[in-house]
Image (cartoon, grey):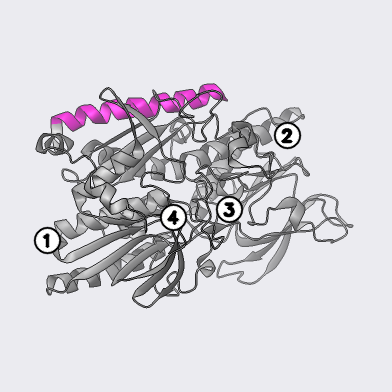
Amino acid sequence: MARVVVLGAGIAGHTAALHLRRLLGRRHEVVVVSPNSRWNWIPSNIWVGVGRMTGGQVTFPLAPVYRRKGIDFRQARAVAIRPEGTTEDPRGAVDVLYTSPDRQGEQERISYDYLVNATGPKLNFAATPGLGPDGNSVSVCTFGHAEDAAGALGGVIEKLRAGQRQTLVIGVGHGTCTCEGAAFEYTFNVEHELRTQGVRDRADIVYLTNEYELGDFGVGGMTFDQQGFITSSQLWTESLFRERGVRAITRAHVERVEPGKVHYETLDGRRDSLAFDFAMLLPPFRGADLKAYDREGNDVTDQMFAASGFMKVDADYSPKPYEQWQADDWPKTYQSPHWPNVFAAGIAFAPPHPISVPRKSPQGTVITPAPPRTGMPSGVIARQTAYNIADMIRHGGGPTHTASMAAMGAACVASAGKGLTKGSAASMTMFPIVPDYQRFPGHGRSVKDTYGELGLAGHWIKHMLHFLFMYKMKARPGWKFIPE
Amino acid sequence: MSDVNTQIAHAPMPTGKTLKLRTSLPFQLWRFLWINLRIYRMVIKEHQAR
């Protein structure tokens, strides 16, 4: 009998756990360790943040699903990995701290034969003084944050109704943030909401981003073949900003957020500030900051994890200039190079480098989006990791399935306003996610498979995906046929 | 700050016809099917690449 421990129950962890349970017979054990009791379809948090959905509509309790599927759920936070076990027990182990009300604060060491680290990101609000719900801005990263953001937005709408002008700043709160797509979505959902409420004319909306150009989205932008022209996601995005009357500040690193004022530095070295009445600024991510110890108890954290806290896998981490970046630098199996029974899935793996061109201000401040690996790539990597572990348990040998982001496409549907007949979204596909200039000279991606379109149909698709993934993740009948 | 707002001011502005098509129910129903086919194609390519 083998025991597989999955750390985290987000998109990657939950997907890996469900597939492992499906692939492995009941004589093998699947254990999920997550500090959260509920699963959250994070893409719909945007709609919670404008009051169009509730936290309850984008989450469900994990325990009943795991009980039904025969998965052992421990509501606990992993704090350390012991990949070589201890002097008493050579099996790998994880130290956890329970967060469930009945076992709060209790510690346990859980041994494993295989480990999937899918701990996702730590929301690093501390990287920017004053950033976040404990500071002077709101967030939509969790359903709780999004509900608070909706409350704050409601206050702004009341003031607009009373005739006061309001400035809303939406974007990212650090020069190395990722998830610009989510900031884009929230910007246009807020804009749509203000129009729906009839108060748009008194509101100034400013999109504040670390992207070099609009439409970069942390993937270096996209090139489309549309209506006989090769065009870019930059032009396409700028067109939407013009149509909806949204201003933008690009190439910015937020230095601090004071009550009602955001201070930022731009790539040309200038420092500036902007007064606001409402600010939703996403935090940068870092790894979950797990520690790692060898059998004798020596700290081997720097062997298992990168300085960012994300886990090192089968990527090429050697420092090299942008001109030498290769598609092959990106991991394929997400297996730890030191401990072959340890894998990372989703955001938890350390990317070898960004996808967007790296840039620094004259002061040396890095202002470059981190590479996105949420949503579809997270799910695909998790599924392939489950296949690899199941094969290794059943047949021995090494990983047989790959999921390189340089060989994988992605579909991204970015909402620009909710409504069955008045909503809209930007539907985008790209192939591959990480440009491969050897395979696709010129643009790095297949122009045939990289596409963008705005319209109501995109909103329907995003809404459909909400229901499909809530269904799939509840492991209802036929869930495995809904692709990641 | 970059001159992004100047760029935005000169970006292509959708015509009334384009805006109407973006919310036209029959046209968007067709686009719904077409975009889903594109996404499905992406999923198939990803499965083939395994």
* Cα–Cα gap, marks 2 and 1: 60 Å
Q: State the image coordinates of residue A55 (x, y, percent, origin top left).
A: 36, 60
Write the residue at 39% across / 29% down.
Answer: A450
Q: Which residue is mark 1?
A: A198
Is B31 on the left or on the right of A402, as rendered?
Answer: left
Vertical side of A257 occupied by A289: above or below: above
Measure the alpha-carbon separation of dots 3 and 2.
21 Å
The subunit letter for the residue under badge 1 reads: A
- What is the chain letter for disc 3? A
Q: Which residue is mark 3?
A: A8
> Who's the residue at 15% across and 56% down the image?
A196
Residue at 14 percent across and 39 percent down: it is B19
User: Are the residues at dot 2 and dot 1 in contact (C-beta closer than 8 Å)?
Assistant: no
Per the image, the residue denoted by label 4 is A210
Please identify, in this view, whether the residue under mark 3 or under mark 2 is nearer the observer.
3
Image quarter of residue A29 = top right
